[in-house]
């Protein structure tokens, strides 16, 4: 079974990275989140901009509040190295 996404959780921020087999991308995203000063409205844009310095097609999305069952869940972001959770051939 293929892994679809890799999850990294740091200080109540969880980043799910795609593709999951790219450990370097996951580490870089985790390092950036760890360097962030905290959760704010600008975190998604800041993370996307920082990722694009190394991965020009990267995109970041925040998990919809409708998907959260409990308000204590971590702030969840999705980071897509190639701009989508699907491989380029499947987009």
Image (cartoon, rainbow, N blue to C red):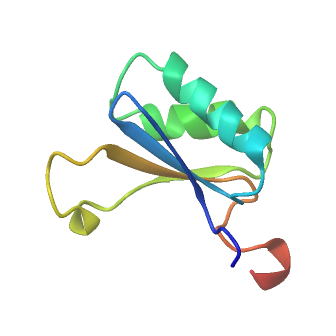
1 or 42: nearer the viewer? 1
Which residue occupies the extreme right position in the image? 89
The residue at the point 23 percent across, 61 percent down is 68
Which residue occupies the extreme front position in the image? 1
**Callout count:** 0
In which quadrant of the rendered view does residue 24 lie? top right
Q: Is residue 11 above or below residue 8?
A: above
Q: Is residue 9 above or below residue 22?
A: above
The residue at the point 68 percent across, 34 percent down is 27
The residue at the point 63 percent across, 52 percent down is 59
- Find residue 44 and report its horizontal and vertical position in percent: 47, 41
- Find residue 86 and report its horizontal and vertical position in percent: 70, 74
User: Is 68 displayed left or right of 82 in the figure?
Assistant: left
- Find residue 64 and report its horizontal and vertical position in percent: 32, 62
- Find residue 87 and report its horizontal and vertical position in percent: 78, 73
61 or 9: nearer the viewer? 9
Q: Is residue 73 above or below residue 84?
A: above
The residue at the point 81 percent across, 35 percent down is 54
Which residue occupies the extreme bottom position in the image? 90
Q: Where does the C terminus fall, quadrant-wise?
A: bottom right
Q: Where does the N terminus fall, quadrant-wise?
A: bottom right
């Amino acid at each position: 079974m293929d892994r679809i996404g890799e999850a990294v959780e740091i200080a109540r921020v969880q980043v799910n990275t795609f593709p999951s087999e790219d450990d370097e991308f996951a580490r870089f995203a985790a390092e950036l989140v760890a360097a962030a000063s905290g959760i704010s409205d600008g975190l998604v844009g800041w993370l996307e901009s920082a990722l694009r310095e190394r991965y020009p097609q990267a995109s970041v999305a925040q998990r919809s509040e409708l998907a959260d069952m409990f308000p204590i869940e971590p702030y969840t972001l999705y980071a897509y190295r190639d701009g989508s959770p699907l491989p380029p051939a499947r987009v």
